[in-house]
């Protein structure tokens, strides 16, 4: 187990891989994992996966969600989406399917990529309960934990578990609703279940059992933000913070049992809330890696929420967020298609990379420096090869034939050409 080994000072094979990718000493990775400041997402039974590190002092990672819905259930489309996400730099993929044979879809998706793979098991538990009893509200506790174990047996490397949606918080929300209520699917399933059954969230109540299951597979728990704000008006409110405080305590319990944790965060936040939110998570959750779902900095951006998410993600990353969620142009509007995933992944990757240029300095800037050198010399193929979307870049370059070696933006008035002529460089 990564954390157990790390605490003993044993450097695992996975730590060495992460150290090489991060250009760091394996001992440093070992120390980060031991403290829970970074995680290595790898299920012990998943073979064909390249483990990655997420956390402090590491490259900022991005995750892309794919998955079927009741309105469009096409596993091949989801596989194409997962592949395009990886092609454009997604470090992990999560399957958020809610329709079709979830077991089959998960197996096909996990086999289609070599990056760490995550799921949200409560979706399957809710779907199975709905199929059996006609309602998600009759989902029993055994079903929830059986489904979690089924996912881990399938090799899932990390699971989102909304343990912080507690009865106390939800009861208050019933009396004092917020503008957008609950926008997390998992959070909403559990909140409805809590109110209907008048019982505590099984994932919170039986957290020790959840740790036992996670330990068997060395799976990482991504503590979900079921109460994340769904609009700016709900940003940083009592509900969001209470959930975070609960997650902070769970992080400590998990660390004692050598279970690695990530904490998930907002959501929709105005620009001036982002830094404080990141600082709060880092303090309350004792520097556990922070995975932010955006944050989206305005509510008006659709169908450009990927831009809103990249702006929020860049600020969050600068403040210490470690892992950004891809937001696609179809956010708030519909199930993303392949091109939406591509656009969203590129936007999040640019945000993450921009953060790393500052956070990690020289080792993150290599490609920027190479592109700048190629750009200065008008070496177009060198630029295309290294930029985020070579195909699109080439297409735009060739749209209007150039009469010079410059692009058609300035043509023969190209500053770089003119300078070359007069400086005779
Ligand atoms: S033509 Fe203008 S935009 Fe194009 S490379 Fe030269 S200076 Fe840059």
Image (spheres, rainbow, N blue to C red):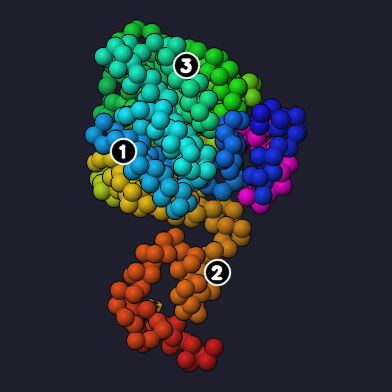
**Mark 1 or mark 3, which has the lower sequence index?**
1
User: What residue would you read off at disc 2?
Assistant: 370
Whole-number angstrom distance, CA of label 2 to CA of label 3: 50 Å
Relative to 189, does residue 58 appear above or below in the rendering? Answer: below
Q: Nearer the viewer, mark 2 or mark 1?
A: 1
Q: Residue at x 39, y 10 (%)?
A: 140
Residue 12 is situated, as x and y percent measured from the top left of the image, at 71, 37
Label 3 neighbour load within 10 Å: few <14, some 14-19, many 20+: many
Q: Is residue 26 covered in magenta?
A: yes
Residue occupied by mark 1: 74
Of 306 and 381, nearer the camera is 381
Q: Secondary structure at mark 2?
A: helix
The correct choice, above or below, for 312 with respect to 137 in the image is below
Q: Quadrant of ligand 1?
A: bottom left
Residue 15 percent across, percent down from the top left: 67, 40
Q: Magenta stretch: residue 25 in it? A: yes
Distance Cα–Cα, label 2 vs label 1: 41 Å
- Identify the residue at image location x=36%, y=32%: 97
């Amino acid at each position: 187990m990564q954390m157990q080994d790390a605490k003993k000072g044993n450097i695992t094979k996975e730590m060495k891989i992460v150290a090489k990718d991060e250009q760091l000493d394996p001992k440093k990775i070992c120390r980060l994992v031991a403290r829970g400041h970074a995680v290595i997402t790898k299920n012990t039974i998943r073979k064909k996966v390249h483990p990655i590190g997420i956390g402090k002092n590491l490259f900022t990672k991005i995750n892309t969600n794919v998955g079927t819905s009741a309105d469009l259930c096409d596993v091949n489309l989801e596989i194409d989406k997962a592949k395009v996400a990886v092609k454009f730099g997604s470090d992990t993929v999560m399957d958020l399917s809610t329709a079709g044979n979830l077991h089959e879809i998960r197996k096909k998706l996990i086999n289609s990529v070599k990056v760490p793979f995550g799921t949200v098991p409560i979706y399957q538990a809710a779907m199975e309960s709905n199929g059996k009893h006609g309602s998600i509200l009759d989902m029993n506790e055994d079903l929830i934990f059986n489904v979690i174990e089924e996912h881990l047996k399938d090799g899932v490397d990390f699971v989102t578990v909304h343990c912080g949606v507690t009865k106390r918080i939800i009861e208050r929300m019933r009396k004092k609703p917020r503008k957008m209520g609950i926008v997390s699917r998992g959070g909403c399933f559990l909140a409805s279940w809590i109110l209907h059954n008048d019982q505590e969230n099984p994932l919170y109540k039986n957290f020790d059992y959840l740790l036992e299951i996670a330990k068997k597979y060395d799976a990482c728990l991504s503590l979900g933000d079921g109460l994340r704000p769904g609009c700016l008006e709900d940003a940083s409110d009592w509900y969001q913070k209470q959930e975070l405080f609960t997650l902070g305590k769970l992080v400590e319990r998990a660390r004692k049992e050598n279970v690695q944790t990530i904490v998930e965060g907002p959501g929709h936040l105005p620009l001036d809330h982002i830094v404080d939110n990141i600082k709060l998570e880092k303090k309350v959750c004792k520097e556990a890696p922070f995975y932010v779902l955006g944050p989206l900095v305005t509510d008006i951006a659709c169908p450009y929420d990927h831009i809103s998410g990249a702006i929020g993600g860049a600020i969050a990353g600068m403040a210490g967020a470690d892992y950004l969620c891809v937001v696609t142009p179809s956010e708030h509007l519909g199930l993303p298609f392949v091109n939406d995933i591509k656009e969203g992944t590129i936007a999040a990757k640019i945000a993450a990379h921009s953060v790393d240029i500052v956070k990690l300095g020289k080792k993150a800037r290599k490609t920027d420096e190479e592109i700048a050198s190629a750009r200065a010399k008008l070496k177009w193929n060198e630029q295309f090869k290294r930029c985020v979307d070579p195909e699109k870049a080439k297409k735009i370059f060739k749209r209007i034939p150039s009469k010079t070696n410059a692009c058609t933006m300035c043509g023969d008035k190209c500053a770089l050409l003119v300078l070359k002529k007069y400086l005779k460089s």
